[in-house]
Image (cartoon, rainbow, N blue to C red):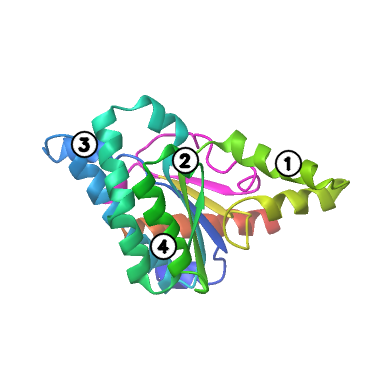
Amino acid sequence: MSTSARISSALPTHVGVIMDGNRRWAKAAGLVGASAGHRAGADHLADLLRWLEARAIRHASVYVLSADNIRKRDSDEVGYLFELLETLVPTRVRESGEWQLHIAGDLDLLPATCAAALTAAIRETAGRRSHLTLAIGYDPKRDVLNAVRGLLVAGAELEGTDLVAAIDDRLPGGPIKDIDLVIRTSGERRISGFFPWQSEHAEIVFSDKMWPAFDESDLDAALVEYGRRRARTAS
């Protein structure tokens, strides 16, 4: 049975990806510095969007840059990441013609020109049928706290499932918040605070591939594993 046949009946609605391993990929390829790896990783986002679109998966969340990384990584490296986020990433999302951009995170941690470029891309891609949420300047605890704080300010008095739904509505991202499948590349076996509220019931698949080397067959393997686990749970 072909891979496409095996994944056709059990596709996730919302896929999350932790794009890890850009620096190690560049080092293994004999490239000087991390910048080549980060550029390859940013360019590879367009491939991921195309693969998901081909499989009619219309909701994706991608971990790009945490608030901790902005604060702790070398300033030259972070500066180059900001450059990619200002130029390459918005361009790739616009060029897709398919994906509406959403941002989860604190844009105040970014240079003003970078934040403005991402905000413009959000505006210019509004109304598209597929939804891409990029975690940039992202702090998972702040993400949930901001949603709860907004409810408190609004004076909402909710309990149980109504409260959960209200928090969902106030979280950043597209219309479907729950993530069904999380894929992490680079061989690391942790999710590093990747949308913990939204990923509560997600299947997690770890790939040993570095993000720039992760290919379409690797995505299909993750989708097959997702379908296998869900079938086992349902039986």
Q: Amino acid at mark 3?
A: Ala
Tell me, yes or no, if residue 47 can be seen here: no
Q: Dot 3, how many residues are within 10 Å of its Cα: few (below 14), some (14-19), or many (20+)?
A: some
Say which element carries label 4. Answer: helix
Instruction: Name the residue carrying label 1.
Output: 148
Which three-letter amino acid code belongs to the residue tagged 2? Asp
User: Distance between the Cα atoms at labels 2 and 3?
Assistant: 24 Å
Q: Secondary structure at mark 1?
A: helix
- Of circles 4 and 3, the one toward us is 4
**Residue visible at 28% across and 49% down?**
84
> On the image, which quarter does residue 207 sit in?
top left
Q: Which residues are magenta?
A: 185-213
Which of pointers 1 and 4 lies earlier in the amino acid sequence? 4
Q: Is residue 79 magenta?
A: no
Mark 1 residue type = Val
Q: x, y percentage for residue 234?
A: 69, 58
Q: Which mark is residue 34?
A: 3
Name the residue that disc number 4 marks: 121
Q: Earlier in the sequence, mark 4 or mark 3?
A: 3
Where residue 68 appears, as percent x and y from the top left, is 45, 29
Dot 2 falls on a residue whose secondary structure is helix
Would residue 99 appear left or right of 94 to someone viewing this image?
A: right
Mark closer to the chain start, 2 or 3: 3
Residue 227 percent across, percent down from the top left? 55, 60
Q: Residue at x 53, y 74 (%)?
A: 127
Measure the C-alpha gap from mark 1 to mark 2.
Answer: 20 Å
To which residue does mark 2 refer?
108
Nearest-to-viewer mark from 4 and 2: 2
Q: Is residue 128 above or below residue 14?
A: below
